[in-house]
Image (spheres, helix red, strand yellow):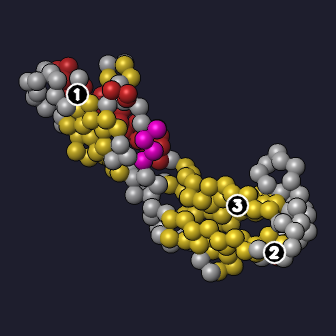
């Protein structure tokens, strides 16, 4: 019976450890996308994206000339609008500005509009990240700590949630008695289950 008590404590601790590793820091809400000034008149490109929870801090990053360590032409002028509001304009860009970072406010559904101006060949990369400083919730632990379990093959289970960035299932690793049992477990973005 003490081994089973140990199992519940280990399962709870390991789940907590794995999930908390995934919550701290930044998460992508608009993956890095390159925009290039083609020949002809400048064209506005509209991208729609959603966020799980708009009630957190978000940062828009622009890499003039593309992501770091690339040899693309810098942009001298561009207009970037978010949900109909210009957040960056021609005055923010020139041949010496390689990186811009600004806080932005998002909604559940968002429209990012980008118009690259200047001479053809100029390129920039845009991405938006969120800051997650809220620890995930873990609940419905089974068996509960100090439970008296008669069946040594009882289901080990826990549910979890992260209201800001969600839970990345690839970051969850479940270990029991020093053995990685992740591949033998059912792991989703909201719970895990394992039967010994």
Q: Nearer the viewer, residue 136 or 69?
A: 69
Cα gap from disc 2 to disc 3, whole angstroms: 17 Å
**Can the viewer see residue 98 in this picture?**
no
Residue tagged 1: 195
Q: Is residue 186 above or below residue 128?
A: above
Q: Residues within 10 Å of mark 3 (few under 14, many from 20)?
A: many
Residue at (55% x, 65% y) in the render: 49
In the image: residue 189, left or right of residue 100:
left
Badge 3 element: strand
Residue segment shown in magenta: 167-171
In the image: residue 154, left or right of residue 168:
left
- Please state which of the two labelled residues, at mark 2 or mark 3, is closer to the viewer: 2
Which of pointers 1 and 2 lies earlier in the amino acid sequence? 2
Residue 105: where, in percent of width, then height?
Answer: 57, 72
Which of pointers 1 and 3 lies earlier in the amino acid sequence? 3
Q: Outermost residue toward the front?
A: 40
* Main secondary structure of the magenta stretch: helix
Q: Nearer the viewer, residue 45 or 25?
A: 45
Q: Quadrant of residue 14?
A: top left
In the image: residue 97, left or right of residue 61:
right
Residue 13: where, in percent of width, then height?
Answer: 33, 33
Residue tagged 3: 126
Q: Residues within 10 Å of mark 1 (few under 14, many from 20)?
A: few
Residue tagged 2: 42
In the image: residue 15, left or right of residue 109:
left
Q: Quadrant of residue 20?
A: top left
Q: Nearer the viewer, residue 130 or 13?
A: 130
- Please state which of the two labelled residues, at mark 1 or mark 2, is closer to the viewer: 2
């Amino acid at each position: 019976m003490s081994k089973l008590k140990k199992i519940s404590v280990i399962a709870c601790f390991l789940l907590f450890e794995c999930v908390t590793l995934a919550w701290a820091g930044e998460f992508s809400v608009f993956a890095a996308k390159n925009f290039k000034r083609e020949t002809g008149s400048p064209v506005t490109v509209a991208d729609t994206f959603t966020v799980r929870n708009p009630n957190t801090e978000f940062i828009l990053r622009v890499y003039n000339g593309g992501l770091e360590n690339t040899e693309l032409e810098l942009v001298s002028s561009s207009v970037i609008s978010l949900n109909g509001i210009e957040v960056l304009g021609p005055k923010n860009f020139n041949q010496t500005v390689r990186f811009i970072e600004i806080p932005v406010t998002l909604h559940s559904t968002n429209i990012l509009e980008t118009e690259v101006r200047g001479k053809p060949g100029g390129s920039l990369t845009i991405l938006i990240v969120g800051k997650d400083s809220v620890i995930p919730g873990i609940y419905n632990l089974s068996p509960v700590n100090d439970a008296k379990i008669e069946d040594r093959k009882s289901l080990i289970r826990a549910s979890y949630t992260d209201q800001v960035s969600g839970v990345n299932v690839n970051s969850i690793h479940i270990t029991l008695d020093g053995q990685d049992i992740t591949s033998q477990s059912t792991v989703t973005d909201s719970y895990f289950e394992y039967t010994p």
